[in-house]
Image (cartoon, rainbow, N blue to C red):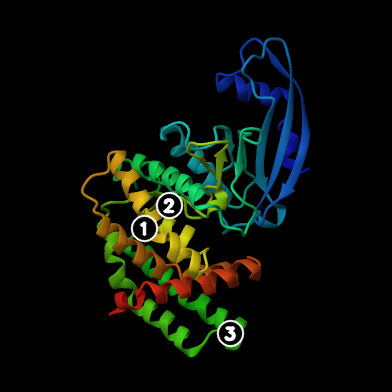
Amino acid sequence: MDPVATRIDADALTGILQRAGILHAGRVREVGVLEARDTVLSSIVRLRVGYDGEADGAPASLVLKTQLPERLQAGWDGGRQEVAFYREVAPATPPGLLPRCFDAAGEGDGQPWHLLLEDLTDTHAIATTWPLPPTEGQCQRIVRTLARFHAAWWDHARLGVSAGRWATPADLEGMLSSFEERFASFLERTGDLVTPERRRLYERLIDAGPRLHARYATHRHMTIVHGDAHVWNCFLPAGEGGGRLFDWDAWRVDTGADDLAYMIAMHWYPERRRLLEHRLLDAYHDTLLAHGVAGYGRSALDDDYRLSVLWLILRPVWQAGFDVPPRIWWNNYERILLAVDDLGCRELLG
């Protein structure tokens, strides 16, 4: 087990559950491991919990999420980001959209961190095994869940103040400069896999970047975005109903269309994307309106979506640079560039 897991002993967990208001007279007697697995970026441990005394309503199991030792380094802040999400954002999010978090610890750069989360294993499931896409009905439920979350934070007064931060012009300029260096390394790594035509597309986007950032600079019709909102980061309950969004280590303040573009254009091959894309954007927009978002027309969503798709061609390059496996970043690269062609995104470059 990861060394962090040993710190969640019976006494520590008793205090955590008491502070959460779900354990009163009873105490945790024992904590054991039901199962453990590693993802690309973190370690997931399901904990079995036994009690002494009155413990009605206390969870029989929990999920402990911690860092992988090789990812515990300065400069990679995913764990710190997710801890911040469960401290800053989750408590003010309407119930039923996220797993409940009982403990979020460790915010220092390169320092140990952990999350202690509600275990949804017995009531919820991921729709399909990656990389198989869900059914249209499941996709509708996932997109509507995402829209409900986005609507809750849409143009919220806390955005950029006490929930995330606004990227400054210097931040955006630095991102483009850093990407330009990363792209040069990417070209060295991939050789002739990147065609001259696609290389030119990236160069044009770097040149047009300051102008395209004008949409972000409006700070209007913005929300908290997941940042890694593929369909396998949503637990769906059995039967009907909305899901629970998880894996918040890439969240930020931005346009909601970023999450849709990542979910649909980045991960689906053209035939399925063309079949479902418009209907899912309709469902997302309808759900925004039903949950109080005003002044954001359907055409504005299309405009934001196309711009988000264009910006997403940067993502596979970043992924390759952070040693994400090629089976992930290469397929993302091919799919997002096909979406750019289908949606006429080059027009945005002038």
Residue 243 locus on image (x, y percent): 51, 40
Where is mark 3, residue-wise?
193
**Camera-side mark, 3 or 2:** 3
Decide if residue 178 is in sight here: no
Disc on the earlier residue, 1 or 3: 1
- The image quadrant of residue 10 is top right
Determine whether the residue tagged by mark 2 lies in a helix, strand or loop. Answer: strand
x 58%, y 84%: residue: 193
Disc on the earlier residue, 3 or 2: 3
x 62%, y 81%: residue: 189
Where is mark 1, residue-wise?
167
Determine whether the residue tagged by mark 3 lies in a helix, strand or loop. Answer: helix
Q: Which mark is residue 252?
A: 2
Residue 252 locus on image (x, y percent): 43, 52
Locate the N terminus and report the quarter of the image it occupies: top right
Left or right: residue 248 versus residue 52 is left
Decide if residue 34 is in sight here: yes
Q: Amino acid at mark 1?
A: Ala
Which residue occupies the foreground of this view, 91 or 338?
338
Residues at marks 1 and 3, CA–CA distance in whole angstroms: 33 Å
Above-or-below relation of 200 to 93: below
**Camera-side mark, 1 or 3:** 3
Q: Amino acid at mark 2?
A: Arg
Disc on the earlier residue, 2 or 1: 1
